[in-house]
Amino acid sequence: MSPLFCALLLNDVIIDAVYRKSPFYVALLDAKSAFDVVKHSRLYRKLYLAGISGSLWLLLHDLSVGAQTSVRWENLVSEPFDIKQGVRQGRILSTELYKLYINDVLNQLEDSALGSYIGHIHCPIPTCANDVTLVVNDHTNMQTLLSTVIRRSIHYSLQNVKLLKLGNQ
């Protein structure tokens, strides 16, 4: 989602909870260096499983195979070196590729049926790129969702998931 849409969704969840006078808990998660840990082989498999095949799959594959970069510092530029994993930040497809890479984690969180609702609409995890918001009405449910994220982040080598804020209203 776009950051604005995520903020709107979170705002509506908060307004709904305040209106119903029910507690709510929000955790803002930021996966530090998340784009750097995307393993290409796993991403290619997920692209295929998502129904992306043929020439489009080959194009996405070829964008990363043999890709090189160098580092510029002041007036010096390093020798080029191969990029072995990750998606480049700021590129048009990077956010979508990253979300596809972690989509099964997001699905597991959503399928848990834990989290907040706006009316009958389940709204547990507004997500924009590597920023994930967990919104629940019960602190036990928050712990369950956080434990799921931690367990899955270890699986994806995202050991740098950082809890930015946890609070209740």
Image (cartoon, grey):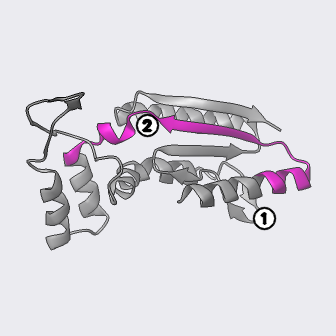
Give the crowd class for mark 1: few <14, some 14-19, many >=20 residues within 10 Å: few
Badge 2 or badge 1: first in the primary sequence: 1
- Report whether 102 appears left or right of 168: left
| Separation (CA) of disc 2 from disc 1 | 29 Å
- Report whether 143 appears left or right of 21: left
Q: Which mark is residue 119?
A: 1
On-image quarter of the C terminus:
top right
- Report whether 59 appears left or right of 30: left
At x 34%, y 60%, the residue is 92
Q: Quadrant of residue 141?
A: top right
Looking at this rendering, what residue extends furthest in the front direction?
75
Which is more toward the observer, 73 or 63?
73
SS state under label 1 = loop
At x 76%, y 58%, the residue is 12
Q: Which mark is residue 10?
A: none
Stretch in magenta: 14-40
Q: Is residue 25 magenta?
A: yes
The location of residue 6, given as percent across then percent down, is: 61, 56
Residue under label 2, please give it. Answer: 152
At x 49%, y 54%, the residue is 107
Which is more toward the observer, 119 or 14?
14
Q: Amino acid at mark 2?
A: Arg
The location of residue 59, given as percent across then percent down, is: 16, 65
Q: Are marks 2 and 1 in contact (CB under 8 Å)?
A: no
SS state under label 2 = helix
Which is more toward the observer, 55 or 22?
55
Which is more toward the observer, 90 or 78?
78
